[in-house]
Image (spheres, rainbow, N blue to C red):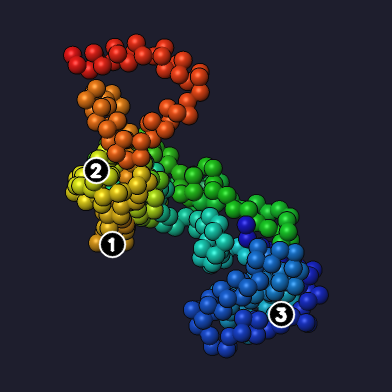
């Protein structure tokens, strides 16, 4: 959409009160192109309707600045304006007439793309001419393991890539012939529709359906590429995945996308990385979390255990009297920073004390003896048992005997 503010009638009414274009942009008469662009950029950012919803004054200022820039940025229009002032464009004598000023030019498209493409996050409109255009991006995804994400890896992707046809050099015309100017759009590659909207009259620019935006049509098609100008082939592309990449992040490989149009650069290849879940490690930002089981004996007496990390097993000393849920920090064993692989997060291990099961009779006896020495909790719990508990205990006595015999086997 390109705003078209200068309707004939309005312009005549405003002719006398209209501010000088240089004054509007706040630049000297001899300002160069860069200075004009800079001044307009500042004003357009400040007064753009998207940034000032419902503010009529801002809207008027935006239109005024856009009009001033559109005239002064065009050397021919600027020359006329310098000579005749606003009269040059109000349809009066001596001027270029109404046609001398419109927003129809590619220049506006460029600066709008320039300013608002990054400012408002909107999609950048393509150029309004059939000049060089960057090719489309290709998206692919690749699955890697947790360890590969931590340490970085190389993957080979196979994809079908288009290349300009060797026979017709991308024109799509049969060798010996050449493409002709598109009759529908006159070679512009785009068709302009006018409609009413918030800005007043707006122009909608659409890619020409006849020539697909190239501005050219092929009468006799190249047999090799069937007139498309491209041939497709399977290609293998190596992707270097940096250490520290996280699930869902993408890697951009420049100029490995679709070929450009009219000599423009290729689009990019965007590789989305999917990281598989790990059975024991979990990532939180740059840290790795895991749990490790230790025996009650180690927890009570202290000792050394092996902790698995992404760098292999690490030997860690457990202090006597360690409680379950104790956290051990392994500094620098986490995920590296994407920016600097020397900087790494930590590995945080939660220690869990394992309760023994399937004890042998001897082990059970030792445990009972241990209990007697450390507070006699078993005896105490027997004393507080209800009658029902005792009944159920008797019932399971046979089973207990059985268990003991089984253990001996
Ligand atoms: Zn061809
Ligand atoms: Zn066309």
The residue wearing badge 1 is 343
20 or 37: nearer the eye?
37
* Mark 2 or mark 3, whichever is nearer to me: 2
Q: Quadrant of residue 50?
A: bottom right
Give SS at disc 2: helix
The residue wearing badge 3 is 87
User: In the image, residue 67 lies at what x, y percent?
Assistant: 65, 72
245 or 61: nearer the eye?
245
Which residue is rendered at x = 78% and y = 70% of the image? 10
Quarter placement of the C terminus: top left
Sequence-earlier tag: 2 or 1: 2
Pointer 3 residue Cβ closer than 8 Å to ligand 2: no
Near mark 1 (Cα within 10 A), the count class, few <14, some 14-19 or many ≥20, is: few
User: In the image, residue 106 lies at what x, y percent?
Assistant: 54, 63
Sequence-earlier tag: 3 or 1: 3
386 or 341: nearer the eye?
386
In the drawing, what numbered circle is on residue 193?
none
Q: Are marks 2 and 1 in contact (CB under 8 Å)?
A: no
The vertical placement of 274 against 22, above or below, is above
Sequence-earlier tag: 2 or 3: 3
Answer left or right for 55 relative to 323: right
Q: Quadrant of residue 13?
A: bottom right
Quarter placement of the N terminus: bottom right
How far apart are the alpha carbons under marks 2 and 3? 95 Å
Q: Quadrant of residue 194?
A: bottom right
The vertical placement of 299 against 75, above or below, is above
Which residue is rendered at x = 29% and y = 12% of the image? 402
The residue wearing badge 2 is 298
* Mark 3 or mark 1, whichever is nearer to me: 1
């Amino acid at each position: 959409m390109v705003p078209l503010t200068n309707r004939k009638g309005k312009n005549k009414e405003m002719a006398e009160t209209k501010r000088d274009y240089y004054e509007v942009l706040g630049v000297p008469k001899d300002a160069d192109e860069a200075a004009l662009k800079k001044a307009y950029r500042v004003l357009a950012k400040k007064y753009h309707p998207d940034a000032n919803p419902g503010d009529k004054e801002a809207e008027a200022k935006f239109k005024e600045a856009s009009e001033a820039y559109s005239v002064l940025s065009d050397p021919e229009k600027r020359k006329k304006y310098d000579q005749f002032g606003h009269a040059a464009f109000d349809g009066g004598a001596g001027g270029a007439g109404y046609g001398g000023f419109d927003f129809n030019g590619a220049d506006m498209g460029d600066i709008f793309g320039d300013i608002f493409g990054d400012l408002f996050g909107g999609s950048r409109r393509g150029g309004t001419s059939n000049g060089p255009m960057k090719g489309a991006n290709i998206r692919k995804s690749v699955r890697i393991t947790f360890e590969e994400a931590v340490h970085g890896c190389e993957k080979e992707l196979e994809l079908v890539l288009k290349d300009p046809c060797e026979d017709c050099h991308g024109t799509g015309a049969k060798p010996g012939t050449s493409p002709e100017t598109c009759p529908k759009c006159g070679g512009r590659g785009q068709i302009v529709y006018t409609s009413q909207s918030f800005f007043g009259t707006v122009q909608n620019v659409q890619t020409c359906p006849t020539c697909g935006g190239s501005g050219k049509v092929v009468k006799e098609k190249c047999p090799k590429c069937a007139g498309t100008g491209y041939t497709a082939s399977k290609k293998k592309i190596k992707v270097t995945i940096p250490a520290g990449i996280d699930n869902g992040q993408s890697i951009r490989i420049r100029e490995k996308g679709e070929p450009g149009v009219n000599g423009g650069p290729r689009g990019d290849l965007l590789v989305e990385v999917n990281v598989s879940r790990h059975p024991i490690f979990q990532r939180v930002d740059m840290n790795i979390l895991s749990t490790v089981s230790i025996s009650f004996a180690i927890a009570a007496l202290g000792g050394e255990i092996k902790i698995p990390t992404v760098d292999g097993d690490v030997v860690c000393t457990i202090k006597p009297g360690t409680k379950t849920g104790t956290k051990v920090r392994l500094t620098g064993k986490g995920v590296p920073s994407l920016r600097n692989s020397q900087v790494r997060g930590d590995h945080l291990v939660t220690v869990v004390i394992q309760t023994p099961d399937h004890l042998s009779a001897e082990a059970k006896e030792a445990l009972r003896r241990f209990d007697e020495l450390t507070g006699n909790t078993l005896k105490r719990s027997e004393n507080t048992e209800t009658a029902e508990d005792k009944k159920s205990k008797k019932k399971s006595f046979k089973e207990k005997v059985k268990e003991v015999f089984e253990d001996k086997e």
